[in-house]
Image: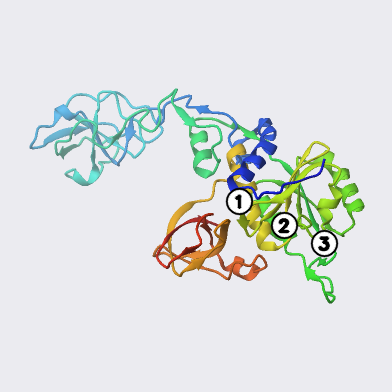
Amino acid sequence: MHRTAHRPATVQAHRDKVRRLLSPLAARVEIVPLREALGRGLAADVTAPLDLPPFANSQMDGFAIRSADIPVGGAELRVTAPVPAGAEPAALAFGSAAPIMTGAMIPAGADAVVPIEQAVPDSFPPPGAAATVRLPAAPAGNFVRDAGSDIAAGEPALAAGSFLGPGQLGLLAALGLTEVPVHVQPRVLLVTTGDEVVEPGRPLQPGKIYDANGTLLDSALRQAGLQVTRTGISADDPAELELLLRAHAPDVDLIVTTGGVSKGAYEVVRQALAGHDVEFGAVAMQPGGPQGIGSLDGVPVLGFPGNPVSCLVSFEMFLRPVLADLFGSPAPRTTVRARLAEAVSSPENKHQVRRGTLSPDGTVRLEGGAGSHLVHALARANALVHIPAGTAALAAGDEVEVWML
């Protein structure tokens, strides 16, 4: 049944509640080709099936040698057949040096490489020509990449929950893998509410505003790897909204609404979900205090506030970090410490999230005020600036936690 929370929850408590709500979705796994796994979250540990590199190879163009063949003052060695990359060379005879290319396999018997720049002459002889080369002494292992020096067979390659970017997928390909287990991407129904909200491109009548939330949240959700269904703007009719939500519920894994969750007289989301297991209450956060959470016909529901900045801050504070934790995607926001470029005040009993621009010198300048309607300031910002509960004021130069956007 519909419930109202009376005491504001902490940010962490509400985030934990969102995590519990969505955690059953993390059990769903599918196997996809590497090319389709970009931006997904790894669903199982991966162990290296082979050594990387799989054989000792040269780090430089040069001459493969047996280090014991060259005394401290250098030596003249007979040049043998060259070793190109991709070939399996013959064993290296005593007192000889093999021209070797970067990445080529170290011949049996060789244990070091002397770069071509240190050779006299400092060029490779024509293939098949009888030649000698003078080389300086080199220690065993000189410019040699040992087998397994990157990762050895049987070692952990990637942990479950890893975000699969180009580097991670490159590693899996280097290990010879062609497919990978990933978490199934949740399907989300996004519903924007409000009689006052108009789709961009239509005439704007007095008292109306264009819908920013639909585009704002749709972009954020898709950027986070979710599959999004949008219904357009829902009018302030609770019965119609309930029918719309129940019609789409069987086809999605999560319902996200914007607007209609406060304590006003026309809070359509609260009214539409009055007969369902959804709780509406406050979180000690500014902006984004009013929140809804629960389920409709077994489908998780998150109700975000209607002001655009409140809406995005709610996503960033509650949904995005839970997705990163449960599904490995999207990648967590980069967190840094920065110095405030100016003094700031904050409600002492709330966690305030301000928009800011982090400069290369490590200072962060706040963009706009604390208002939840300042979309222009949000668009200028490259970071979220956190002022935790219990802090009423900070001075210029004080350190704050910053999440990079």
Tell me which amino acid carries mark 3. Answer: Gly
Tell me which amino acid carries mark 2. Answer: Pro
Q: Give the residue number, with chain letter if any, for mark 3.
A: 194
Horizontal and vertical percent position of residue 328: 58, 39
Residue density around tag 2, few if under 14, some if 14–19, many if 20 or more, within 10 Å:
many
Q: CA distance from mark 1 to mark 3?
A: 23 Å
Q: Give the residue number, with chain letter if any, for mark 2.
A: 305
Q: Are marks 1 and 3 in contact (CB under 8 Å)?
A: no
Q: Earlier in the sequence, mark 2 or mark 1?
A: 2
Horizontal and vertical percent position of residue 77: 16, 33
Q: Are marks 2 and 3 in contact (CB under 8 Å)?
A: no
Q: Residue at x 84, y 47 (%)?
A: 273
Q: Residue at x 18, y 24 (%)?
A: 94
Tag 3's secondary structure? loop
Quarter of the image for residue 293 reads: top right
Give the residue furthest to the front.
Answer: 6
Q: Give the residue number, with chain letter if any, for mark 1.
A: 317
Give the residue furthest to the left.
Answer: 73
Horizontal and vertical percent position of residue 30: 67, 31
Tag 2's secondary structure? loop
163 w.r.t. 405: above or below: above
In which quadrant is the C terminus drawn? bottom right
Q: CA distance from mark 2 to mark 1?
A: 13 Å
Residue density around tag 1, few if under 14, some if 14–19, many if 20 or more, within 10 Å:
some
Horizontal and vertical percent position of residue 214: 75, 59
Q: Is 35 or 336 nearer to us in this picture?
A: 336
In which quadrant is the N terminus drawn? top right
Judge from the rendering whether residue 276 lies leftward or rightward of residue 117; answer left or right. right
